[in-house]
Image (cartoon, grey):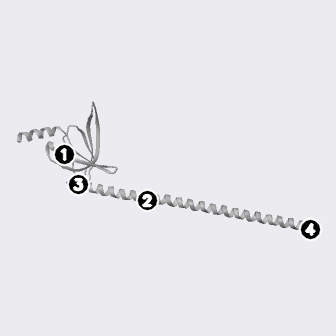
Amino acid sequence: MDLLREFELKEVAKIDRPRLKAGDIVRVSMKITEGDKTRVQVFEGTVIGVRGSGPSATFTVRRETGRFGVERIFPLYNPLITEIEIVKRQKVRRAKLNYLRQAGRRRVKEDELSMQRHIQEEENKKRLAEEAKKREEEKKTKEEAAKKKAEAAAKAKEEEAKADASEEKTEEKSE
């Protein structure tokens, strides 16, 4: 066992990796081979925890994209990892930050509730705007009807005045 452990330590010493802790925000660059092409894919997130020691050590990185939390477990000494960059170190009081998973769920529920409230508010705004338009249209139609009545009354008065004037003229002529 000691020979195996010594060999592992020699192999690990060749690869330079930073000391990761829970709470670190890291950017992991990893080679990905698709067919004949290889590219470097970057995964940035919070280290939830580090597990194991020596060449079998792994670390879990979590990031939230949109409504989904994505976790990825990386072997620390994987030769496909080209770079591990520590973007920010945060002070945390736990070795494993599993509570971030529940916080994400809570946040998603809060987002859903706020979105439902937003949709309802928008519907209420639309409904109120439509009601205001209907009231304005009704008001315009009432005004138009009142104008038509006033015009009709004015025409009727004019006709009466003409009729009275014509009666007076006929009366004057007959006298």
Distance from disc 1 to disc 3, alpha carbons, whole Å, reads 16 Å
Residue at x 80%, y 64% (from the top left corner):
159
Extreme-top residue of the structure: 36
Residue at x 37%, y 59% (from the top left corner):
113
Q: Amino acid at mark 2?
A: Gln
Q: Amino acid at mark 1?
A: Thr
Marks 3, 2: nearer the viewer: 2
Does 38 appear above or below 47?
above
Image-based side of 6 in relation to 66, left or right: left
Q: Are marks 3 and 2 in contact (CB under 8 Å)?
A: no
Marks 2, 1: nearer the viewer: 2
SS label for mark 4: helix
Q: Earlier in the sequence, mark 1 or mark 3?
A: 1
Distance from disc 4 to disc 3, alpha carbons, whole Å, reads 110 Å
The residue singled out by tag 3 in the image is 98
Would you call the spot at circle 2 few (<14 residues within 10 Å), some (14-19), or many (20 or more)? few
Would you call the spot at circle 1 few (<14 residues within 10 Å), some (14-19), or many (20 or more)? some
Front residue of this view, candidates 52 and 118: 118
Does 85 appear above or below 115?
above
What x and y, as percent, mark residue 13? Answer: 15, 39
- Quarter of the picture holding the C terminus: bottom right
- Quarter of the picture holding the N terminus: top left
Please tell me the numbered disc located at residue 172: 4
Q: Earlier in the sequence, mark 2 or mark 4?
A: 2
The residue singled out by tag 2 in the image is 120
Distance from disc 1 to disc 4, alpha carbons, whole Å, reads 120 Å
Q: Earlier in the sequence, mark 2 or mark 1?
A: 1
